[in-house]
Image (cartoon, rainbow, N blue to C red):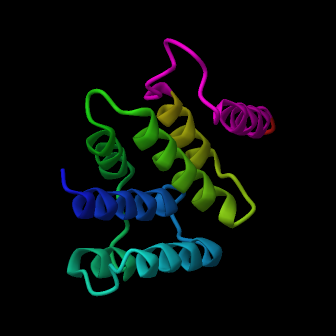
């Protein structure tokens, strides 16, 4: 996969992540626009369509993109870049939705080092898992 295709796929994952709770929050929208601009994807037809918010992204589609991005044997760099980008989006609105926490939990299962040494982002994931567990126990 070319660097340009990987970057575009990352942006698609971020749009899917923003939709995972059923609505794109205004802070998420601002973050997405910043990422799109930084990566010169403002004129990309597919990205424009996704950002138009006319049709929501299905969570299963987001998960497919996530697995496509990481591939069968993800590198630590790819994994951490993806986790960092998704975490920044999830935290951009100051509220971690249950669906967002589930996505982050699923992403942790794809960590290339989950079998070996722990990643530098494990503390973040554990914090999100605790928030998720609290949210579930209060429902």
Question: Magenta includes 128?
Answer: yes
Say left or right for 13 vs 107: left
Above or below, comparing residue 46 to residue 131 in the picture:
below
Q: Residue at x 71, y 30 (%)?
A: 126
x and y, in percent, of residue 57 in the image: 36, 62
Q: Residue at x 26, y 43 (%)?
A: 68
Give the extent of the magenta segment. 109-137
x and y, in percent, of residue 136 in the image: 72, 35
Which residue extends farthest bottom?
43
Q: Residue at x 35, y 56 (%)?
A: 58
Which residue extends farthest top?
115
State the count of labels. 0
Q: State whether residue 53 appears in this view.
A: no
Above or below, comparing residue 37 to residue 24 in the picture:
below
Q: Which of these two is toward me, 126 or 112?
A: 112
Q: Residue at x 45, y 60 (%)?
A: 14
């Amino acid at each position: 996969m070319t660097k340009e295709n990987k970057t575009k796929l990352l942006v698609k994952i971020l749009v899917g992540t923003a939709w995972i709770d059923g609505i794109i929050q205004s802070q998420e929208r601002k973050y997405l626009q910043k990422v799109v601009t930084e990566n010169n994807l403002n004129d990309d037809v597919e990205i424009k369509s996704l950002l138009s918010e006319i049709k929501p992204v299905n969570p299963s589609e987001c998960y497919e993109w996530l697995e496509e991005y990481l591939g069968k044997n993800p590198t630590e760099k790819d994994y951490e870049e993806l986790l960092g980008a998704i975490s920044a989006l999830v935290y951009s609105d100051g509220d971690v939705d249950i669906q967002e926490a589930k996505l982050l939990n699923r992403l942790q299962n794809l960590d290339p080092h989950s079998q070996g040494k722990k990643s530098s982002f494990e503390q973040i994931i554990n914090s999100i898992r605790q928030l998720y567990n609290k949210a579930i126990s209060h429902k």
